[in-house]
Image: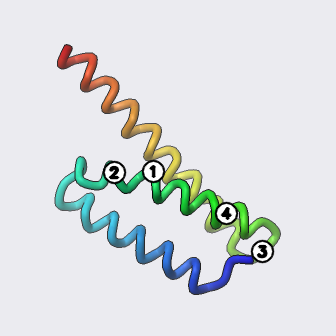
Amino acid sequence: MVKQKDVDAMLAELEHARRILRQSREAVYPQIDSLVERAAVLHKESIGGKYEPALCSVHTLLDSMRRGVKAQQTLNQSVAA
């Protein structure tokens, strides 16, 4: 069961990633996978609870961001080659 402190911890992680992203886009790339995995775990644990809609949204958005980053990296590698 997800508690408010779990949601607060995830929010703090996202805020930290946002600050890093504002400084350097590439600097946040290593954190994306761990954020997606953390959001997935929280979303799974929240099913049926009051935090489920928000955590589902966060997980979906982070997963989308991860796919976009990987697509951009692949594109950049193919252009550089």
Please determine whether, in this image, residue 73 is positioned above or below residue 65. above
The reply, left or right, for residue 26 in relation to residue 57 is left
Q: Where does the N terminus fall, quadrant-wise? A: bottom right
Q: Which residue is mark 2?
A: 30
Judging depth in this view, the residue of 38 and 57 nearest the camera is: 38
Query: Regarding mark 4 in the picture, which secondary structure is present there?
Result: helix
Residue farthest top in this picture: 81
The percent position of residue 68, horizontal first and vertical second, equals: 41, 38
User: Cβ–Cβ below 8 Å for labels 1 and 2?
Assistant: yes
Amino acid at circle 1: Asp
Mark 4 or mark 3: which comes first in sequence?
4
Q: How is the image coloured?
A: rainbow
The percent position of residue 26, horizontal first and vertical second, equals: 24, 47
Q: Which residue is mark 1?
A: 33
Amino acid at circle 4: His
In this view, the mark in front (4 or 2): 2
Q: Local crowd at mark 1 within 10 Å, few (<14), some, or many (≥20)? A: some
The percent position of residue 23, horizontal first and vertical second, equals: 17, 60
How far apart marks 3 and 2 lie (CA) works out to 30 Å
Residue in the image at 78% along x and 74% along y: 49
Amino acid at circle 2: Pro
Please determine whether, in this image, residue 73 is positioned above or below residue 24. above
Query: Regarding mark 3 in the picture, which secondary structure is present there?
Result: loop
Mark 3 or mark 2: which comes first in sequence?
2
Q: Quadrant of residue 13?
A: bottom left
Residue farthest right in this picture: 48
Amino acid at circle 3: Gly
Please determine whether, in this image, residue 73 is positioned above or below residue 15. above
User: Cβ–Cβ below 8 Å for labels 4 and 3?
Assistant: no
Q: Which residue is mark 4?
A: 43
